[in-house]
Amino acid sequence: MTEAGGSRWQALLVVMAAGLVFPSASVLYAQAPVLKVKSVEVRGNKRIEEPAIRGRLTLKVGDPYTAEAIRAQIRLIYEMGFFEDVQSETESVADGVAVTFVVREKPFITEIVFDGNENLSEDKLKEKITIRSQSFLDQQQAKESAERIKLAYQEDGYYNAQVTPIILTLEEDRKRLTFFVREGTRARIKTVTFEGMSVFTKKELFKILATREWIPLYGIITRFQIPSVFSDAGLLKREELANDVERIREVYLNKGYLNVQVGLPTVELTEDKKWFTVTFPIVEGEPFTVGEIGFRGNTVFEEAELRAGMKIASGEIFQRAKIRDEITRLTELYGAKGYAFTDVSPSVIPDQQTRTAAITFHIKEGDLIRIRQIHITGNDKTRDNVIRRELRVNEQEVIDTVSMKRSFQRLNNLNFFETVEILPKQVEQDKVDLEVKVKEKATGSFSIGGGFSTLDQFVAVADITEGNVGGRGHMVRVRGQLGQRRSLGLITFRNPYLEDSLTSLQGDLFRTITNYTTYAEDKSGASVTFGRWFSEYTSGSFSLVAEQLRLSDATVDAPQFVLAQIGSQSTTGFRSSLGRDTRDFYLDPRTGTRSAVNLDFGTPALGGTNNFYKVQLDAVKYTPLFWDTRHSIRARFGITDGLGGKPIPLTERFYVGGINTMRGFVFGRAGPVTTSGALLGADRQIIFNNDFIFPISSEAKLNGVFFFDYGKGFNEGEKLSTKLRSAAGFEARWISPFGPLRAAYGFNLDPNPLERKGVFEFSVGSLF
């Protein structure tokens, strides 16, 4: 054996000997005892019950105890989301290990409050947050909720808003989460720029845009939260930007700029996050005029009939608004003939060479439609005949869309219903059923209270009214009033349709006691009034009247003609009227006119002592404007005189001045007065009222009015060319549940000596 070979055998023997003396590591591990889990406990939980925690654990008694298994159980407990700390504790026991998981629950939020929020309500902020009270605090959720609140403020224009969530300990296990809000100032629109615009001015576009520059006056309105159609001016409404683009396009299209291009605006916020600059890019192009106008598809009407009444003419500047008006006119023209489903679609073909636009109205006439049946629903109290007599369409007749619109107006004017719907439902190719759906409202009212009227001073009022007695449409009213200057009692019954005819009947019993400062008047009487509809919009009335009057307590400065009438007198005669009323809704009209002539006679032939006549002309027109605003102008003229040598009764003279005639003047003082200021009354009057009416709150039926009144009452012999009096001011009108209320402040624009420069007035019961 060589020396090298001997060495190898020696080394092998040494290794073998070592293996016999020292066993390998794997052999040692295999021989070591395996530790078992002998028990699993949970400690530290307060609100989360132990079975709920144990239900999440996968470690069971008897399982091998390993570090990895313990870490896995800790992860499972954390995943429950209720704990901010989880630890494990072990204790060696016989043949194993006792394992205890020690938990610390997250803070339990029992309250969530907001502090510092003035411009966004608590309810709105609660909608934004994801964390809820009576839950465990999730720090990430609290941060996300704070960010969501901040975004809500940014959406409302508060780009400097800061929101900080803070936890306050109320008791050991009760916490309050407070979101502290620092709102900052609201970002406003400082500048609106129209790049490329030359046809219009900014002022013209601001009339129709929702995006407008901030003006300090609007800031005052917004600061004090005064409701107004202007209160949101200067605030950026991103959802309106695309609409504003279309509004600008519409303005250009109505000036004939068919090639106009208006891009989405760019919005830039200043570094201090207080101001916006909004820029609308505009490419105007050139204006177009109207070329040929034609009709296609018409067979019911000749082209000449379709052109009659057309408001578009060849050669004029193209206006898209006129096309829409023409579609409405043609649709109503066909609808009035029974073609209720006629469709009119225009096509506009511009000629770039001549800058003209040809317009063709394509008409799909459809079938002649008849009404098969009329179904009325929702009228639990009101009888069917009360509704049917207001309808201007009948079963088995050709449908008339214009008459359907009028039917809606008449039902609405009953004031019996919250909502009225008239819906055609096609049941055959040429037949429809009309679904008349109403939602009734309370028609009876009882009110008792007090107030202040500039004419009556302090008053106590009680009123019981039922406008739909027994569902028959009859009206009964009992009204009493006690005031410093006037007291009254009134009982009224009205049947608007005797036996469903066009004739109405009304009876009134009344008594009034009025202090006119220079004398007192006690008047009582009764009247019976018959009314009659002569056409859809024209009606008349004739009243037989009997009144007993007693004038007393004349002062030393009373005019001579007043002193001459002190004592008892009576009026018997009639009062008549003939009028036409096309207003859409008499309590709050948007459009239409009302005109009337009234003729009154008092005659001894019926037993009274007074002998006079009185003529009054009255007309008012309502014109709808932008944003649900409207303009009304009213003109009144009246003349009265005694007959047979008799004087004009004091109660029949005109007292111009006051909330129902000339606002800005004390009652009667826009007419004749004595040097001492006593009222004389007038034998003639001329009054003009100009009102710009705008909604303050449509839901509450509250309107504002800017007015200008112009008129006067005239002495006997005074020329009508005498300078008229003028006043201007503001009025609020509220159609309240217990009747119309008005409050007005008017400025006398040219006061005479001893006259007040401004007058506040308040009235209840009627709009004039």
Image (cartoon, rainbow, N blue to C red):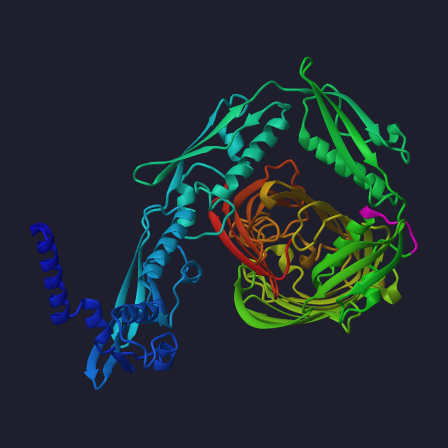
Residue ranking furthest to the right:
396
Find out whether residue 650 is within the magenta segment: no
Residue 484's quadrant in the figure?
A: bottom right
Q: Residue 97 at x, y = what percent?
A: 23, 80
Residue ranking furthest to the bottom:
94
In the image, taking residue 599 as reference, residue 38 lies left or right, namely left
Q: Residue 613 at x, y = what percent?
A: 77, 52
User: Magenta part of the protein: which range?
Assistant: 396-402
Task: In this rendered view, identify the residue nearer to me: 181 or 7.
Answer: 7
Residue ranking furthest to the top:
353
Q: Residue 191 at x, y = what percent?
A: 41, 32
Task: In this rendered view, identify the residue nearer to me: 53 or 659.
Answer: 53
User: Is residue 472 visible in this depiction of the protein?
Assistant: yes
Q: Is residue 147 above or below residue 240?
A: below
Residue ranking furthest to the front:
1
Task: In this rendered view, identify the residue nearer to me: 425 or 324.
Answer: 425
Q: Is residue 630 above or below residue 201?
A: below
What secondary structure is the stretch in magenta mostly built from? loop
User: Is residue 43 visible in this depiction of the protein?
Assistant: no
Q: Is residue 378 above or below residue 747?
A: below
The number of numbered discs placed on residues in the rendered structure image is 0
In the image, taking residue 227 as reference, residue 407 lies left or right, namely right
Q: Residue at x 23, y 78 (%)?
A: 33
Q: Residue at x 54, y 36 (%)?
A: 244
In the image, taking residue 713 as reference, residue 161 lies left or right, namely left
Q: Residue 289 at x, y = what percent?
A: 69, 20
